[in-house]
Image (tube, rainbow, N blue to C red):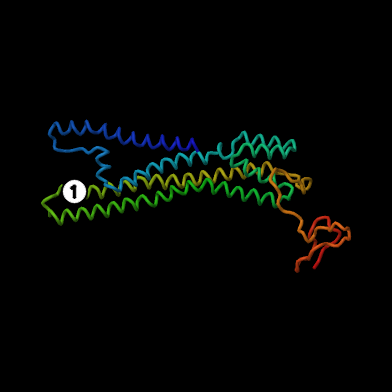
């Protein structure tokens, strides 16, 4: 979390420095042009941003958020981060030795999307192959959702920023027609300023939306490729797993809360009859190790 905060602060500072440096670099050029009496005023980047009006504030925030989400998405979907090769080799080495308890402890002490999925599968080895595969699939979907959550925000930004720019366009047009109605066509400077605000707001919204959408599809495919790599590692590690030999074994330190129902507990007097009442509709064998099928 501290690393992400530092990354966000550095990204914000870099964005501000880019705006300031661009404005300072263009001011001498504008002054030189004015000194020659050319009559053409070259606007600096900062002047263009101010010309966009109030709508440039939310668009600027969206630009910083876009850069942050792109950087965070690239790091989050990296194959080395999702499935570190060291973690993969260590778990496979413990599997070769048959040390599933050691593999579980290693996965718990070294969390990553790969080890999180493997840890769930190892803890369910005693419950059979279907339960182990179902548990790993659920954990894999959880890790995929965790990666896709931040990536989906880029799609939201890609949709919202053109709308924000369009809102700035509408307010700019209202101002333009208000100036035209008040001063008539004899004041072209006010009309041109309002039209400039319209164009800057629209262009700024599209300028943020295009890379946001492109990065969204790129990072989504990158996350899908990382999830497929995790599946390949799991299929390789769990091939020929001796589920029959591990039947009934509990691996891990999670507490088991399930217990034998009270109406199946034998009384202390040794009469051999079960205490309580068997629920209506309970048919077939209920508890492993019972002498016969208990039926209602």
Residue holding disc 1: 192
User: Is 237 situated left or right of 143 in this image?
Assistant: right
Give the SS element for disc 1: helix
The outermost residue toward the right is 271
Q: Residue at x 24, y 40 (%)?
A: 47
Question: In x, y percent, where is residue 159?
Answer: 39, 52
Q: Quadrant of residue 92?
A: top right
Question: In x, y percent, where is residue 25?
Answer: 26, 31
Rate crowding at label 1 as few (under 14), some (14 to 19) or many (20 or more) other CA atoms within 10 Å: few
User: Is 273 situated left or right of 128 in this image?
Assistant: right
In the depicted view, which residue is nearer to us: 156 or 88? 156
User: Is 285 situated left or right of 110 in this image?
Assistant: right
Q: Is residue 15 above or below residue 125?
A: above
Q: Residue at x 34, y 43 (%)?
A: 60
User: Is 266 situated left or right of 281 in this image?
Assistant: right
Question: In x, y percent, where is residue 4?
Answer: 47, 38
Q: Residue at x 72, y 43 (%)?
A: 251
């Amino acid at each position: 979390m501290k690393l992400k905060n530092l990354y966000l602060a550095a990204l914000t500072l870099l964005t501000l420095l880019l705006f300031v440096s661009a404005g300072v670099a263009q001011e001498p050029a504008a002054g030189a042009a004015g000194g020659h009496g050319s009559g053409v005023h070259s606007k600096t980047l900062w002047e263009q941003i101010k010309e966009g009006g109030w709508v440039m504030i939310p668009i600027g925030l969206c630009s910083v958020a876009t850069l942050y989400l792109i950087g965070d998405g690239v790091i989050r979907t990296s194959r080395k981060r999702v499935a570190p090769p060291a973690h993969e080799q260590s778990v496979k080495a413990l599997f070769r030795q048959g040390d599933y308890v050691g593999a579980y402890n290693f996965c718990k002490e070294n969390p990553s999307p790969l080890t999180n999925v493997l840890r769930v599968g190892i803890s369910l080895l005693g419950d059979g192959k279907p339960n182990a595969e179902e548990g790993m699939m659920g954990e894999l979907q959880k890790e995929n959702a965790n990666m896709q959550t931040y990536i989906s925000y880029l799609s939201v930004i890609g949709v919202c920023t053109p709308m924000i720019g369009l809102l700035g366009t509408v307010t700019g047009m209202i101002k333009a027609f208000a100036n035209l109605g008040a001063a008539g066509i004899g004041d072209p400077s006010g009309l041109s300023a309002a039209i400039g605000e319209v164009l800057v707001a629209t262009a700024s919204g599209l300028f943020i939306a295009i890379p946001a959408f492109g990065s969204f599809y790129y990072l989504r495919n990158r996350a899908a490729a990382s999830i497929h790599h995790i599946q390949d590692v799991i299929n390789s590690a769990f091939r020929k797993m001796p589920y029959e030999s591990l039947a009934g074994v509990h691996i891990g330190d999670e507490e088991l809360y399930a217990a034998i129902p009270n109406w199946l507990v034998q009384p202390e007097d040794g009469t051999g009859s079960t205490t309580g009442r068997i629920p209506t509709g309970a048919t077939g064998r209920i508890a492993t190790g019972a002498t016969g099928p208990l039926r209602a």
